[in-house]
Image: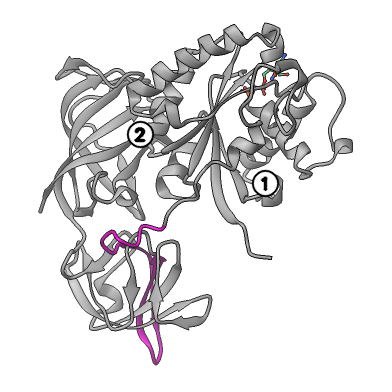
């Protein structure tokens, strides 16, 4: 059988709206976990998600099979939900970039503060596909009127941040009772759309960005006897071929690609998603390092003198002011950067400007800021090359903020 295409799926939404319960039910219905493994009573589905989360937080390498499930069309991996420690960092560094998100909204509560935050964050992180699960329909007597009301409320929110609600499935369900998860519910005869599982098959698998300029962030550099310098990294965008001339930025050294290897096999070309080692003639091991980016000489990676970014402050104990210099994690680079200007504070739910030139930023704020790297850094405009336009800001051992580059002043 042909291998199924793969989609990374995030579950977002206000706390207690039923994300864990929905995931638990899904893993049960798709046969990933068996009925006996679940406890009895109220929270048996949630138990599954808690278990996964616990293991992750303890740093245990979890059996990924537990977080994977299949539909008729695709294989899905569930990536962690916002609020959990490294979600944002993982998303940004590509470790668990979500291709789509399920927004869970409880029918009794409706849109809540975290619903808004997560929708905004999903948009900021470049998650372009959504499914909306209107959960806990059992608590509102499976009422069609309430569903319609919520659909309108959520649609308005999605429109504000730039999603197209007309193209997004809204599925009324009960994660707890099992309505409309894998089988059509008899309690909601008025609903003629897809079940939740069917709605997942309407998602599109991520496209390989082969038409964008070549970008390979360097993870490591080896020197191999008889071969020469071999940088290793994942092709983020574009196509690399044997015989191409590539340049590494920021150092600006270039050379000809003599060979490309993946999983110990030689190949003539590499595409987005491929983890490769490639031998470059004319480049020494000490000329390049982790955090540099390879590109073609006719469209070299952009080295920023400074850049403008839109950021969301996720957690910071105090106030962030001009002069703050935390470490920016952008692709494989980690560079301390100084905030040189706080241009605008924006409403995280709507994107509207709230304040020009604010004095400080705190947890929950979104803002447009000017940034100056303390060392040369490759970063691209999110509009041009999204894969190299996102970053996480880390300080004191945690992810303080996440953001994207909206403009660059090249070196
Ligand atoms: P999370 O914080 O979004 O992961 O939410 P949980 O999955 O932990 O659910 C929060 C609470 O809501 C738990 O007590 C669940 O049993 C309950 N719950 C979840 N889904 C439903 C549902 O469809 N109907 C009802 N009545 N309760 C639900």
Query: Can residue 119 be spotted in the picture?
Result: yes
Q: Quadrant of the C terminus?
A: bottom left
Secondary element under disc 2, as helix, strand or loop, is helix
Helix or strand or loop: what does disc 1 sit on?
Answer: loop
Q: CA distance from mark 1 to mark 2?
A: 28 Å
Nearer the observer, 223 or 150: 150
- Residue carrying label 1: 71
- List x then y, in percent, for residue 162: 33, 28
Residue that appears at 55% across and 41% down = 202
Residue 304 is left or right of residue 385, and the answer is left
Q: Is residue 1 left or right of residue 152?
A: right
Magenta part of the protein: which range?
A: 208-234
Q: Please tell me how crowded label 2 is: few (under 14), some (14-19), or many (20+) other residues with Cα within 10 Å.
A: many
Residue sitting nearer the eye, 38 or 317: 38
Image quarter where ligand 1 lies: top right
- For image coordinates 22% across by 46% down, the residue present is 381
Name the residue rendered at 37%, 77% in the picture.
Answer: 278
The residue to which callout 2 is attached is 124
Q: Residue at x 44, y 41 (%)?
A: 89
At which x and y percent is residue 59?
62, 45
Mark 1 or mark 2: which comes first in sequence? 1
Q: Is 89 placed left or right of 348 in the picture?
A: right
Q: Which mark is residue 111?
A: none
Tally the numbered discs. 2
Q: Is residue 57 magenta?
A: no
Looking at the image, residue 13 lies above or below residue 140: below
Q: Quadrant of residue 22?
A: top right
Depth order, front residue of 203/351:
203
Whether disc 1's CB lies below 8 Å from ligand 1 is answered no
Q: The N terminus lies in which quarter of the figure?
A: bottom right
């Amino acid at each position: 059988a042909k291998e199924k295409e793969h989609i990374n799926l995030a579950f977002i939404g206000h706390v207690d709206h039923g994300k864990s319960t929905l995931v638990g039910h899904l893993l049960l219905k798709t046969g990933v976990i068996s009925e006996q493994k679940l406890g009895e009573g109220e929270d048996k589905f949630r138990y599954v998600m808690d278990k996964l989360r616990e293991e992750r937080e303890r740093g245990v390498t979890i059996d990924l099979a537990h977080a994977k499930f299949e539909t008729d069309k695709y294989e899905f991996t569930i990536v962690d939900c916002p609020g959990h420690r490294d979600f944002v960092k993982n998303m940004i560094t590509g470790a668990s970039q979500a291709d789509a998100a399920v927004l869970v909204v409880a029918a009794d509560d409706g849109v809540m503060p975290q619903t808004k935050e997560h929708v905004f964050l999903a948009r900021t992180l470049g998650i372009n596909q959504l499914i909306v699960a209107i959960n806990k329909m059992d608590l509102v007597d499976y009422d069609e009127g309430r569903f319609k009301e919520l659909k309108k409320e959520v649609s308005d929110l999605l429109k504000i941040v730039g999603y197209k609600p007309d193209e997004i499935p809204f599925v009324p369900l009960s994660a707890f009772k099992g309505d409309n998860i894998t089988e059509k519910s008899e309690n909601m005869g008025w609903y003629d759309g897809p079940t939740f599982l069917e709605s997942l098959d309407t998602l599109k698998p991520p496209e390989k960005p082969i038409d964008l300029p070549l970008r390979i962030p360097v993870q490591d550099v080896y020197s191999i006897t008889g071969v020469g310098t071999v940088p290793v990294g994942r092709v983020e965008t574009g196509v690399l071929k044997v015989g191409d001339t590539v340049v590494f930025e920021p150092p600006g050294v270039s050379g000809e690609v003599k060979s490309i290897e993946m999983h110990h096999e030689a190949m003539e070309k590499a595409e987005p998603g491929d983890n490769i080692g490639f031998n470059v003639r004319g480049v020494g091991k000490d000329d390049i390092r982790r955090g540099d980016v390879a590109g073609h000489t006719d469209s070299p990676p952009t080295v920023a003198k400074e850049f403008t970014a839109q950021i969301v402050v996720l957690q910071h104990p105090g106030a962030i002011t001009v002069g703050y210099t935390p470490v920016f994690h952008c692709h494989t680079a980690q560079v301390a950067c100084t905030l040189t200007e706080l241009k605008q504070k924006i409403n995280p739910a709507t994107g509207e400007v709230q304040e020009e030139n604010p004095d400080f930023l705190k947890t929950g704020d979104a803002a447009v800021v000017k940034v100056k790297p303390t060392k040369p850094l490759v970063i691209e405009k999110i509009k041009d090359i999204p894969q190299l336009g996102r970053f996480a800001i880390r300080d004191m051992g945690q992810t303080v903020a996440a953001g994207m580059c909206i403009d660059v002043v090249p070196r």
